[in-house]
Image (tube, rainbow, N blue to C red):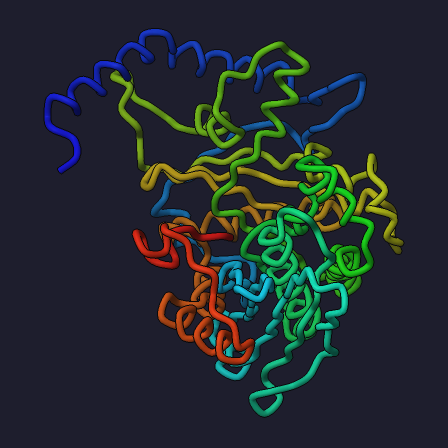
């Protein structure tokens, strides 16, 4: 034991000093003020960056009633992508491997077998040429390729991870789009935010956003939106956790303060219901209305952005990110549900998606079953990761570069995505 009870008590007293300087009631009151006065629309530098799609309101639904209600979409499909996590080898190669899978509710075992597999590799060897065309495996059920990423001096692991994850996901979604009849739910946002946020992280990463291979991944998501709008089938993204601070930054810029750690904390203060003693009420799910967003990574695909120069077939407004937030007090967690404005501009469709998500969250006490099944199909387990890395070491004739943390914590002490 590294901390004695006296140390634990001392640390708790330190936290008590912080608590005395942070008034939770004030934070809740300010969140309420922002909600009531500043979000219809939220304006920064004379530009509306967030505005309600319809009437701004908060709603609640009894959890049991929501779970038992008839759902609007007879079938749902989910899609997710998982990786082995970026791995560096002693020969200078940094790579990641992602596989994407689609689930169906009710189940479709043949669909579940299908995979799109992408290996991304970064090499500092200027003579290396690693990219291959798509090829088929597993009797035609697996589609796979190797992609050499653009060279960078730093952030090699970030680059190989993001490109593998999003290329596999978007390609599999496009490949399987025709099997979706009623609703497709991506496990995560509707656009590749892990790539789009490069613009704000570092100039070297920002420069990659004009590279052909990177633009091709973003273009896949634009095509995916167009494909589902053309087919009149709703496409949504279910974001299980988000550290976004875009709304909080906008409020801080516009109103001088935003004391929450992130946007999720802001919405939790608005949606959590408490009794007179301050105890959390857990009998109902709560949610916001839908919003149109031009904040942060939502901006490039909005009417304020140019989609990184990618051609769009429809009015730019159709591609804008819209979202609503669901709070489940049973687990004290918040979910963000996204869809293109081309989907949610229709009030009936918007309402159907809302009711479907609330019913799923209530029944599953977590993400919709389609998302949970896709996550299970796409996840690469710890033992599988270890086996893959060993086989890749053999193929490259180079050992994985190990660090002390690998010895201390094990190779998978840190997870990405």
Q: Residue at x 79, y 55 (%)?
A: 215
> Which of the 4 image quarters holds residue 24?
top left
Q: Nearer the viewer, residue 187 or 65?
A: 187
Res 139 seen here: yes
Q: How many marks?
A: 0
**Vertically, is 356 above or below 200?**
below
Residue drawn at x 49%, y 74% is 393
The x, y position of residue 50, in whole percent, is 69, 28
* 373 relative to 198 in the view: left or right: left
Residue 339 in view: no
Towards the viewer: 313 or 127: 127
Residue 357 is left or right of residue 225, and the answer is left
**Quick one: quadrant of the N terminus?**
top left
Residue 339 lies left or right of residue 409; in this view the side is right
Q: Is residue 203 left or right of residue 379?
A: right
The front one of 208 and 189 is 208
Q: Quadrant of residue 311?
A: bottom right
Question: Residue at (64%, 11%) from the top-left corner?
Answer: 255
User: Which residue appears farthest toward the bottom when viewing the image?
Assistant: 139
x 62%, y 48%: residue: 155
> Where is residue 363 shown, x and y percent of the image?
37, 54
């Amino acid at each position: 034991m590294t901390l004695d009870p006296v140390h634990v008590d001392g640390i708790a007293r330190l936290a008590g000093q912080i608590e005395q300087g942070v008034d939770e009631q004030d934070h809740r009151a300010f969140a309420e003020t922002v909600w009531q006065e500043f979000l219809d629309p939220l304006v920064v530098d004379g530009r509306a960056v967030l505005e309600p799609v319809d009437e701004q309101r908060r709603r609640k639904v009894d959890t049991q009633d929501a779970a038992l209600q008839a759902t609007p979409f007879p079938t749902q499909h989910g899609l997710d992508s998982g990786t082995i996590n970026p791995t560096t080898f002693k020969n200078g190669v940094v790579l990641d491997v992602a596989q994407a899978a689609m689930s169906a509710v009710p189940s479709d075992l043949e669909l579940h077998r299908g995979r799109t597999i992408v290996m991304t590799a970064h090499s500092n060897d200027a003579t290396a040429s690693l990219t291959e065309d798509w090829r088929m495996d597993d009797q035609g059920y697996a589609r796979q390729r190797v992609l050499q990423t653009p060279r960078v001096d730093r952030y090699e692991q970030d680059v190989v991870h993001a490109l593998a994850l999003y290329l596999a996901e978007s390609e599999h979604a496009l490949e399987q789009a025709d099997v979706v009849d009623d609703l497709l739910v991506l496990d995560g946002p509707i656009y590749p935010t892990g790539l789009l946020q490069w613009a704000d992280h570092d100039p070297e990463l920002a420069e990659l956003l004009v590279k052909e291979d990177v633009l091709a991944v973003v273009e896949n998501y634009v095509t995916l939106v167009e494909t589902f709008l053309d087919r009149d089938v709703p496409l949504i993204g279910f974001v299980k956790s988000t550290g976004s601070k875009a709304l909080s930054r906008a409020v801080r810029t516009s109103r001088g303060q935003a004391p929450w750690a992130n946007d999720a904390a802001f919405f939790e203060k608005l949606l959590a219901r408490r009794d007179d003693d301050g105890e959390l009420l857990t009998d109902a799910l709560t949610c916001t209305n839908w919003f149109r967003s031009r904040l942060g990574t939502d901006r490039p695909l909005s009417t304020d952005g140019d989609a990184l120069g990618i051609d769009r077939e429809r009015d730019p407004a159709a591609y804008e990110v819209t979202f609503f937030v669901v709070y489940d007090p049973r687990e004290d967690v918040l979910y963000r549900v996204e869809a293109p404005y081309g989907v949610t501009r229709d009030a009936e469709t918007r309402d159907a998606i809302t009711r479907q998500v609330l019913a799923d969250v209530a029944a599953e006490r977590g993400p919709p079953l389609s998302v949970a099944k896709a996550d299970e199909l796409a996840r690469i387990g710890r033992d599988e990761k270890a086996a893959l890395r060993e086989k890749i070491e053999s193929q490259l004739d180079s050992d994985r570069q190990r660090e002390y943390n690998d010895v201390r914590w094990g190779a998978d002490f840190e997870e990405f995505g």
